[in-house]
Image: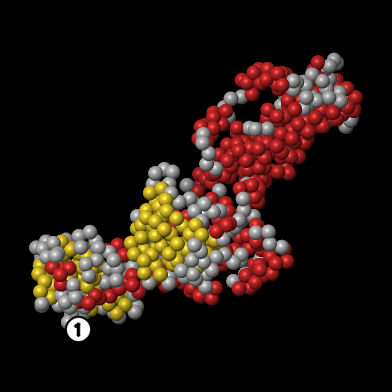
């Protein structure tokens, strides 16, 4: 029995480095490629050389700033994503709380609709949504990239399940102590939901940072376009230079990695408490 | 300082459950009333209704002659200690104690003063900067008491405050609560399922079952004059033995009761309420005998009864004897009975024995379980 367990562990732990490599190699290749002269990137692609930066040239990074308004894209992405994350945390947690705790007519139906909404992908509603924002005259603005994504069924559901599991006594004690509903939410409930806020923030950040289809549909000027459209611009901007694309990719992915590393512990705790797999 | 009155209060929950019906109770200023009953009897509902966490369906609740049916918890000026203490986990003990005062918009210097005073009183001064999860169960319990007392509420509510503590700590904190209540003289409603807590803490005790009060009285009254079988069995540890029986005859010599194949005569019973008992001749009744009413030696006027010992538990200062009245070919149902005898009792050979009952401690209940005498 013990013998088998040891064997099992050996097997699992010898597989883990391999698995990690599979996920890490493309990222590493991107990093290595971003420092290479452009013609070398494709030349090395098929060989082991592809995994080592032949030179440490910053030329590709320079090119990115010269050829496209990278900083503009970056600022746009940061503005859009952080607004969605912050407003979303507020709106969705309040909605989840209302569904979990308050009594109001139609609550059960709305909960059902929200759960149903989780399985509808953006692609399915993109066209009607496009008509709607056109009617509102929102095309080619920040607004059109932010507003439709603040309320999120999945985030609401995460908050909802967490609040259901929170002991009611905290809120009842606060009520007897004289706190009103808003104060109870912000002073008692929300501070105890930090892990869920972290999990929702990271999930929202990841989705929105990489969002491509919707911005492509509703924007056309560079002033409001986010990073994913910026990287796409290289494919249509001759000459096609892989080194530049890699450099752009490195700069686009770094903030995501940073956010994840900073919030990692909370994120794991949040996923564990809500019982959701990311 | 407050007087609390429940007047004919009923509570029906949204799902249709009737948690409380025609509940009336008044709690005098400075009095400690304990609500006791099995789980699901509605005792916690009473507390939540008084706290303002639930709304009454019918009837009135008043505090100091002011009807508070629709008042918010804050307007009622009640404080509550929860079973799991409900200390805010993200706040230090100091912040926990400050919270009700901050909500009442009391100026900061006064808040600090009150928190210091209450922390001194409850021995919490050393713990003020810690978080609730760094405290032991007993310490958390004291913080919960402190948070309830700090803003000087007019009514103090406790919902099974000792049930999460181990037996030793429970006895100690029970004594602390009794002492605190005597000192502060606060109108208190205390809910528990433990009759020992009820008997030791309550100025008066209200025994509840299935959403209504069975009897309200001092611990002594409940023990000596139970109104029905439920109260008789619930109060006392172990509770009263109840044996189905039949009144055969009543007259100048006493009341003859048939218990299985045995007939016992209770002479002392007959005089005062002869008429009441006469109505029950040939009817089913229940005889109630407290475990402490049995003895192994005859005393003056005592009545003897044959028993069969099943088991003996020796507890040090006393023995619990499990027995029944079954004999060979006996039609008497096999009801497990308990006697409580001082000192140590060796298990007798063969298990057949004689017990003596003090007739003054024999109760009679009618078929519905209400007291006859």
Residue A47 seen anywhere in this rendered image of the structure: no
Residue at image x 41%, y 43%? B15
Q: Which residue is mark 1?
A: B299
Subunit under mark 1: B
Q: Within 10 Å of the Cα at label 1, are there few (<14), some (14-19), or many (20+) other Cα atoms? A: few
The image quarter containing residue B309 is bottom left
Choose between A7 and B292: the one closer to the eye. B292
Depicted A120 relative to depicted A92: above or below: above
Looking at the image, the residue that sits furthest to the front is B65
Coloration of the structure image: secondary structure
Q: Position of residue A123 (x, y in %)?
A: 64, 21
Q: Position of residue A192 (x, y in %)?
A: 62, 50
Q: Position of residue A228 (x, y in %)?
A: 76, 25
Depicted B120 relative to depicted B81: above or below: below
Depicted A85 relative to depicted B146: above or below: above
Choose between A132 and B281: the one closer to the eye. B281
Residue at image x 13%, y 68%? B278
Choose between B41 and B187: the one closer to the eye. B187
Secondary element under disc 1, as helix, strand or loop, is loop
């Amino acid at each position: 029995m013990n013998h088998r367990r040891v064997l099992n562990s050996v097997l699992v732990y010898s597989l883990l480095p391999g698995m990690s490599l599979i996920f890490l190699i493309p990222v590493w290749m991107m990093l290595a490629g971003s420092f290479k002269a452009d013609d070398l990137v494709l030349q090395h692609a098929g060989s082991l050389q592809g995994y080592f930066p032949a030179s440490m040239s910053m030329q590709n990074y320079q090119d990115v700033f010269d050829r496209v308004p990278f900083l503009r894209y970056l600022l746009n992405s940061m503005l859009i994503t952080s607004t969605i994350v912050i407003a979303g945390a507020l709106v969705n947690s309040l909605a989840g709380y209302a569904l979990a705790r308050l009594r109001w007519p139609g609550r059960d139906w709305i909960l059902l609709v929200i759960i149903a909404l989780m399985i509808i992908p953006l692609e399915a509603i993109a066209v009607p949504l496009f008509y709607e924002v056109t009617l509102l005259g929102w095309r080619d603005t920040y607004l059109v990239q932010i507003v439709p994504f603040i309320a999120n069924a999945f985030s609401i559901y995460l908050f909802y399940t967490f609040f259901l599991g929170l002991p009611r006594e905290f809120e009842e004690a606060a009520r007897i102590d004289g706190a009103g509903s808003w104060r109870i939410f912000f002073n008692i409930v929300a501070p105890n939901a930090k892990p869920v806020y972290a999990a929702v923030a990271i999930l929202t950040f990841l989705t929105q940072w990489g969002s491509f289809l919707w911005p492509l549909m509703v924007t056309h000027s560079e002033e409001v376009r986010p990073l994913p459209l910026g990287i796409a611009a290289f494919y249509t901007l001759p000459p096609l230079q892989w080194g530049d694309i890699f450099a752009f990719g490195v700069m686009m992915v770094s903030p995501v990695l940073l956010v994840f590393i900073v919030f990692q512990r909370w994120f794991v705790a949040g996923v564990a408490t809500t019982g959701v797999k990311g | 300082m407050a007087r609390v009155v429940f007047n004919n209060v009923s509570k029906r929950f949204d799902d249709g459950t009737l948690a409380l019906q025609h509940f009336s109770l008044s709690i005098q200023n400075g009095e400690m009333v304990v609500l006791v009953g099995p789980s699901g009897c509605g005792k916690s509902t009473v507390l939540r209704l008084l706290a303002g966490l639930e709304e009454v369906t019918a009837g009135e609740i008043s505090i100091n002659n002011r009807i508070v049916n629709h008042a918010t918890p804050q307007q009622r000026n009640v404080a509550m200690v929860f079973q799991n203490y409900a200390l805010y986990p993200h706040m230090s003990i100091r912040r926990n104690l400050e919270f009700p005062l901050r909500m009442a918009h009391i100026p900061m210097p006064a808040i600090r003063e009150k928190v210091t005073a209450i922390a001194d009183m409850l021995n919490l001064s050393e713990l003020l900067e810690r978080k609730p999860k760094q405290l032991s169960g007993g310490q958390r319990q004291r913080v919960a008491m402190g948070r309830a007392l700090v803003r000087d509420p007019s009514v103090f509510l406790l919902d099974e405050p000792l049930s999460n503590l181990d037996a030793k700590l429970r006895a100690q904190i029970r004594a602390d609560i009794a002492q605190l209540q005597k000192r502060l003289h606060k109108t208190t409603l205390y809910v528990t399922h433990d009759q020992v807590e009820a008997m030791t803490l309550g100025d008066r005790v209200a025994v509840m079952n299935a959403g209504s009060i069975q009897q309200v009285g001092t611990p002594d009254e409940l023990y000596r004059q139970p109104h029905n079988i439920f109260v008789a069995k619930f109060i006392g540890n172990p509770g009263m033995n109840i044996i189905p029986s039949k009144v055969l005859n009543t007259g100048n010599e006493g009341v003859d009761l048939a218990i299985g194949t045995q007939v016992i005569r209770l002479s002392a019973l007959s005089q005062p309420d002869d008429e009441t008992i006469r109505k029950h001749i040939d009817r089913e009744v229940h005889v109630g005998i407290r475990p402490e009413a049995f003895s192994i030696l005859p005393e003056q006027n005592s009545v003897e009864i044959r028993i069969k010992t099943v088991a003996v538990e020796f507890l040090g200062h006393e023995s619990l004897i499990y027995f029944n009245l079954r004999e060979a070919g006996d039609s008497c149902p096999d009801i497990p009975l308990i006697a409580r005898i001082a000192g140590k009792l060796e298990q007798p050979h063969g298990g057949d024995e004689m017990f003596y009952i003090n007739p003054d401690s024999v109760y009679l209940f009618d078929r519905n379980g209400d007291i006859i005498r």
